[in-house]
Amino acid sequence: MTIELFWGSGSPFAWRVLLALEYKRLPYVSHLLQFSKQEHKSPQMLALNPRGRVPVLKDGDYVCFESLAILYYLDLKYPQPPIFGRTPEEAGTIMRVICEYQAYIEPRLTAIASGVFQGNADLSGDEITDALHAVANEARTIEGRLSKSDWIVGDACSAVDMVIFPGIQLLKRALERPQARELSSRFMPVEVNYPSLGRWLARVAALPGYERTYPPHWR
Ligand SMILES: N[C@@H](CCC(=O)N[C@@H](CS)C(=O)NCC(=O)O)C(=O)O
């Protein structure tokens, strides 16, 4: 069976899946879609995912979308190396930290990133400032985990690293923009404010195949 991945450059959700495919050393056909040409909304793509969003994974006749669902599918279908832990307890903790990230960090991180990139929010207003404070507090918890272990949960790279890493990269990229200079001081430079998180970012970036996952338009 051939695995095909439909994705877009800079999508943190697609990046998760690329990291998982590379980590599991699965061969795949990459379909890099151009958001600017609305290729993710083509009739062919809408037939695969009626929401017109990426990533979409096709494995033979089976189609899956929603990045976390894709990670879960890949792990059950291609179990080695596992990304949802080696024990039920590890799996539970990996899922728990992913759920915490999605509930308490991701919406705020998205608000900050779209405020910076799309200019649709006042970067010195309460909403964005509060969002950054909340993200910075949550990052402290992750920093605590990473000060005790190389990976966020357990002693190997897992789905939780793949879910959180692209989000942190997106946040860093947003906070590096000149218009975010004042806002960024609470978080940046990551390597100084969160040394263990900084080392973890470098650790993920050193994984085999990482270069193939890096958003082409960020180079
Ligand atoms: N919850 C989805 C989110 C997917 C998503 O929002 N993808 C964005 C790219 S970052 C997209 O395709 N946006 C296109 C659009 O909304 O038109 C997942 O985890 O896969």
Image (cartoon, rainbow, N blue to C red):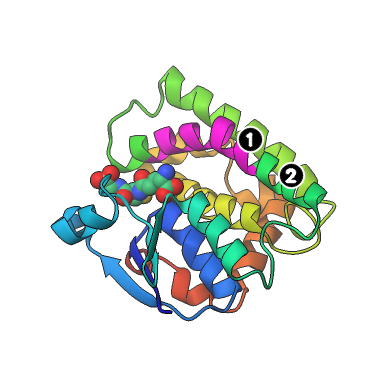
Confirm whether residue 177 shows in the render: no
Q: Residue 29: x percent and y percent?
A: 37, 78
Q: Residue furthest top?
A: 126
The label number, if any, that marks residue 92 in the structure image: 2
Discs 2/1, front: 2
Q: Amino acid at mark 2?
A: Gly
Q: In which quadrant is the C terminus drawn?
A: bottom left
Is 108 a magenta residue? yes
As helix, strand or loop, the secondary structure at mark 2 comes to: helix
Q: Amino acid at mark 1?
A: Glu
Magenta residues, start to end: 98-113
Q: Mark 2 Cα within 10 Å, few/some/many (few <14, many 20+)?
A: few
Badge 1 marks a residue whose secondary structure is: helix
Mark 2–mark 1 Cα distance, whole angstroms, equals: 12 Å
The earlier-in-sequence mark between 2 and 1 is 2
Residue 17 in sight: yes
Which quadrant holds the N terminus?
A: bottom left
The tally of labels here is 2
Dominant secondary structure of the residues highlighted in magenta in the image = helix
Q: Is residue 187 above or below residue 137?
A: below
Q: Nearer the viewer, residue 162 or 176?
A: 162
Task: Judge whether 196 appears above or below 18 on screen.
Answer: above
In x, y percent, where is residue 141?
Answer: 73, 38
Q: Quadrant of residue 100?
A: top right
- Residue receiving disc 1: 100
Q: Quadrant of residue 7?
A: bottom left
Residue 188 placement, left or right of 123: right
Q: Residue at x 70, y 48 (%)?
A: 94
Residue drawn where x is 30% and y is 50% of the image: 53
- Dot 1: few (<14), some (14–19), or many (≥20) neighbours within 10 Å? few
Identify the residue shown where x is 28% and y is 35%: 119
Say above or below: 88 vs 15. above
